[in-house]
Image (cartoon, rainbow, N blue to C red):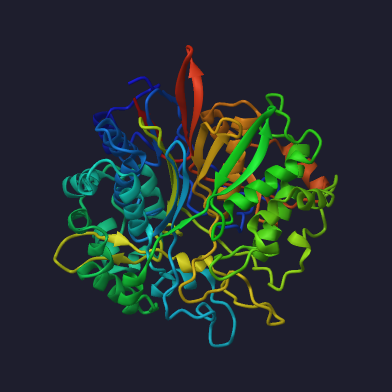
Amino acid sequence: MTYCARWPRTTVLALLACGMMGACAGLGGANRLTGAAVPLAQPESASGVTPKPGWVTRRFAVAAANPLATEAGAQVLREGGSAVDAAIAVQMVLALVEPQSSGIGGGAFLLHHDGQRLQAFDGRETAPAAATPQLFMNPQGQPLPFMDAVVGGRSVGTPGVLAMLALAHRQHGKLPWARLFEPAVALAEGGFAISPRLHTLLKAETALQQDPVAAAYFFAANGQPHPAGHVLKNTELAAVLRDIATLGPLAFYDGPVARAMVNTVQQHPKPGGLSAQDLKNYQPKEREALCFDHTAQQRALRICGFGPPSSGTLAIGQILGLLARTPNAMAAPEAQTPPSPDWLHTYTEASRLAFADRAQFVADPDFVAAPGGHWHSLLDARYLDERARLMGGARMPTAPAGQPGGLRSSWAPMPEQTEYGTSHISIVDAWGNALAMTTTIEAGFGARLMVNTGQGRSGGFLLNNQLTDFSLVPTDAAGQPVANRVEPGKRPRSSMSPTLVFDAQTGELLMSTGSPGGAFIIHFTAKTLLGTLHWGLSPQAAIDLPNFGTLGGPLLLEAGRFPAATVQALQQRGHTVHETTLPSGLQALQRGVQNGQAVWLGGADPRREGIVAGD
């Protein structure tokens, strides 16, 4: 066991029970110049910062968002399991101990490499057959307020993560399917200590209490959330996971659990259209990974992720490509932390162009054709040359979408709207398999609906609100359709960016990374790639860097991490700047060398509770 600061499972349990995994100091959300709260919703509330040491392992490694989940995956690897086996064990424990971010009621993207073949497994949720483009419009033809759209049955898509994991396990699993559920079942039945982060998010919650199952599970009789360290048992989830372990995903997509899901959605005061047939018909997809060539420190790289329905890899590829076309934008920041105003300006302008294309073009490829006939048109060298010429020393008045492939788009741009949470898992195993998996129920606590089959057991699992990742408005004022509008059976656009990096010449895997964070996933992941590949930082040091980014509007900077002079310099260039909490949740594993031996360097975000474990 060679990684730094290894925490045994007993120590992790003790730390969680005593509340010692909590925040050191919160990050404020006020604008330094006005003192006013920043009116920009973040994917999940901040819960403080706990410094992480970075880790080193030799044979295998697991990076996940909660110590109990990480340890479950590491134990599977110690037993000879594969990366996919470990990911299943991790996901089931996360569904229990980090229910606000992911779980069996949601979806995921899994990028897998077996040493030769790269596969992209799509477990994204789908819109019910009953869904219409007007799903989130009121009778007056106006979009619903965002939280009105989120809370309730209307926003629930058909969950996909279990079906996707089963597909990946059939191809790459080494241990029996049932074995992989044992850690989560044991914790659900025996109880787990509520982490400080979960407690913090429950304290900030206002809608979850309206669901009677969730209220009885997460909150005490006085209406207050159970404190950090309180031992919580989820006997309902334990029973559901036992059935899935025995019968496979059929126990989820048909039978009592499926009926309970449908009833929860359809009988809510704000009912949704999820049906038993939607659940029976759900199919995960195996898609072609989206890869692009990139050069860092004179090394040819191949960076791979997901294409649509995710926008993540396309946007990251465009941002990196535009920076590469700007003098000195890729140079190491000369030990400057945070980045300089000049660099932040360039990064912001590149991001605005990428997000304009994202709003215009990206949607489920089974419903929307790629511009120019292929999604790589957005990464074409000549196209990026053209886009880079729009960038200058001052903020562009507008950042328009381009014409990739030389064709004018018939789509209306999607208006900016909030995107939410998720969790990320990176794993490498002793067999040469590696994966990056980003998993989500969308908002913190999803649609605020907890499914229970009514057998007198406590708890259950939360359902996603993934349909609010579609555009709330189906057309623009002129009636031109938005590519990412709601349609039956369609998968909503995502920003999830599970990423694997390879040496372009040898094909050797160099890195697995990704992040939660709604649309800011793109920036969090790009920052980690820049820090490791271009600036020579360790994964932990790159993750620790201040967060920053834009969704096309204001530039957001992580509060307390940037000098006042930086803010002022950016404002002088025309940027509207807000300082706010940007609680990412990055995980990363990078190939390295220590004492002449090949190792895996691991990093986990200090803004959340994740760790790395391995041997």
- Please state if 78 lies on the left or on the right of 538 as rendered: left
Q: Position of residue 119 (x, y in %)?
A: 46, 48
Q: Would residue 557 be seen by someone viewing this image from the given angle?
A: no
- Please state if 40 lies on the left or on the right of 123 as rendered: right
Residue at 47% x, 54% y: name it.
421
Image quadrant for the C terminus?
top left
Q: Position of residue 585 (x, y in %)?
A: 48, 43
Q: Residue furthest top?
A: 595
Q: Nearer the viewer, residue 8 or 167?
A: 167
Image quadrant for the N terminus?
top left
Q: Establish if 244 lies above or below 428.
A: below
Q: Nearer the viewer, residue 103 or 550?
A: 103
> Which quadrant of the structure image shows residue 461?
bottom left
Q: Nearer the viewer, residue 278 or 329?
A: 278
Q: Establish if 518 lies above or below 194.
A: below
- Please state if 382 lies on the left or on the right of 164 as rendered: right
Number of numbered discs visible in the structure rendering: 0
Q: Establish if 470 lies above or below 583.
A: below
Q: Residue furthest left?
A: 456
Q: Establish if 393 lies above or below 157.
A: above
Q: Would residue 36 be seen by someone viewing this image from the given angle?
A: yes
> Which quadrant of the structure image shows residue 222?
bottom left
Q: Position of residue 186 (x, y in %)?
A: 18, 45
Q: Position of residue 480 (x, y in %)?
A: 68, 79
